[in-house]
Image (cartoon, grey):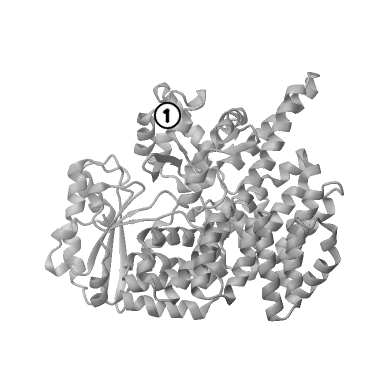
Amino acid sequence: MSIRAPLGFGGYDFISSFKQGIVNLKPRFLRIDCSETLSKVQVENQISIDTNQPLSQLLYLFSAKADEEVYFIIFDNIRSTMNADALMYLSNLPSQLPEFSKNTFFIFTSSVTIKQLRRFHVELQELTLQDSELILNDRFNSTHFTQSQILQIHERSEGVMDKLEQIMDFLEISSVEEVLAHDEIFDDDFHLAHIPKTTLNQIDILFNDPSKELTLQMLNILSILKNGETLTNLKQDKLGAGLNPKHVQELVKFELATTVKIDPSTTIIKINPIIKDCILSKMSKEDIFRISNAYLKVTVIPTNTGVKLSSLNRKVYQSGYSTEEDNTGTLLRYSIEACLQSIKHNEEVGENNEMNQRRLNKLRFWSSSYIYILRNSDRYAETISAVEHLIDIVKEIDSDNLYTYYEHMACAHRMKSNYSEAEKYLNLSEELCPEDDKKTLESIYIERLYLLKHTNMDAAIALAKASKNNYHRKSRAFILSEVILAENKNADERFRALVKLEKRARKLKHFTSANNILFTINEERSNVDKIKYLDEAIKSDQSDYNVCRATIYKHQVLVESGMYERIKEQDIIDLSNIYNYLFRQKFDTLFVQCHRLLWDIADHRQRQDIIYMIFYKGTIVWRLNSDLENEKRYLSLFQDFEDPTRINALVHKTD
């Protein structure tokens, strides 16, 4: 087995997990350090140095304990610079094992992909937010953290196992608040302990060799653009104008960066997060500010009506590669800090600050627009992350508009069913909102109704009854009030009232509100009518979240009716993308429905690829929610697919 384990991604933890599957035999692990081996002779010498035996003698000694022990020989830190002869030697080792060595296995690890070792290959990925939460809950009590703290810990660790371990070590001796307030969790000592000497030497070469100036420039830029960037976008500013594929190749060869293909036309270059921390610690504030100001213009693009985010932002989000904050938040924060520093300097020397104040006004607008774009594109996890990232500096530069950020946070938390957090931020927003901002006050009222609908329907009805006439009859607020008040009617009257309200909302072009009502009405309709109206919802709604809902509900009807033939391959792809979106956003109720739907389709079509994908993600959700019933149910169903006689029949061939 070969394992691609980027620096800090928990390669040893993954290997040690093999012990869980070994019964009646004692596992033994031997490590061969290949970090400085380039040739076959050096590999053979390193085996003797690390084990005091040549490989042939080792295998003979191991065979004597075949009934007692199983051995894993780990060829660790194989570098991309190892020559072809050495790589061929390693790749042939498993097939050349003698008959008496059935208790010996070879594992090859590298931070980069080695094509000669891809026959049975595993790639370790960054931890998702759910992975981080599961690990934290396993080490500490689940009540130890709030959802906001879990998000902050995940952001600080950046999905890197070694960084999360460092944070958890601090949590053993300090409170969560104290650890999160600590700015030097990943200091020079951490870098020295976790970055191999050979990698540190490569970094030194870049800093000291004038011929590597552009490669170092790319490394510095990408250390600020922490979620990666395309070469095309790097070249859009004069700082990156001289960069080319050779510099990308050099960073990858030095094992400082990796590339990720988002689609045929988009490849992202991304620095390892531990390397990124190390590089940032070496950069001056001036360089960080200069790069941030330059690339903010590439990420946030002014338009005639406001601003938009770069097309890469949407591609990265849709691919699931970046699960939380994108680069924009980081660039905004650094750019604001740079502007404030410039204002302070000018004040000290008595120079005019008019240009700086104009710049600060623009940054205020870009920050609020950025959060607005995230929320209104239904990226609620990203909204929470971005606000958490910017809120302290927003308090300093835009305190008068703080209430709008809190209102966005309230909506995002409500959508993720974090109702106590939603109420907290909604109250903060309402307290700070000026009386003349009627638009935001209406949004706060709508949020309050939605929140109470989930937590206290009697209170929601009372609020709607008392407040609906404060709003125009054609407004969303008035229509939602009427929807809430319909809950007081008997079943038939309620249905008729909701049908009228749905038509009225649609006529007024409140499509998301209309479709929310439609989803409720559809529970009472025939399957034929359900599909017809759900198709209308999919075509009309501008909310990605509601399109996901409508798509799931439509295919649930098809499955319940046994009309699998109407579910096409593109439908399965769409549902898989929706499944991943729901997983990333932690929309657990809808996730459970989508999971059941995809499982039924995969079972009918005998799609093992889908079963494997959703089983493991589903298990994470079941454990986080202590949903033992679903965990047991799907484990039993999965074990049916694990049956070798069935697996042979389930191989799905794709072009």
Q: Nearer the viewer, residue 621 or 22?
A: 621
Residue 502 visible in this rendered orientation of the protein: yes
Q: In the figure, is residue 137 to the left or right of 558?
A: right
Q: Position of residue 584 (x, y in %)?
A: 52, 58
Q: Tag count in the figure?
A: 1
Q: In the figure, is residue 89 to the left or right of 520?
A: left
Q: Nearer the viewer, residue 214 or 310?
A: 310
Instruction: For the N terminus, give its image quadrant.
Output: bottom left
Badge 1 density bin: few <14, some 14–19, many ≥20, Cα 10 Å: many
Task: Say which amino acid is labelled 1.
Answer: Thr
In the depicted structure, whether residue 49 falls above or below residue 481:
above
Query: Who's the residue at 53% across and 69% down the image?
Result: 138
In the depicted structure, whether residue 634 falls above or below residue 199:
below
Q: Nearer the viewer, residue 231 or 214?
A: 231
Q: Position of residue 567 (x, y in %)?
A: 38, 65
Query: Who's the residue at 72% across and 65% down the image?
Result: 451
Residue 414 visible in this rendered orientation of the protein: no
Quadrant of the image occupied by residue 454 = bottom right
Q: Mark 1 highlights which residue? A: 215
Query: Who's the residue at 51% across and 72% down the image?
Result: 622
Quadrant of the image occupied by residue 611 = bottom left
Q: Nearer the viewer, residue 13 or 570?
A: 570
Q: Position of residue 421 (x, y in %)?
A: 71, 62
Q: Secondary structure at mark 1?
A: helix
Instruction: For the C terminus, give its image quadrant.
Output: bottom left
Q: In the figure, is residue 311 to the left or right of 292?
A: left
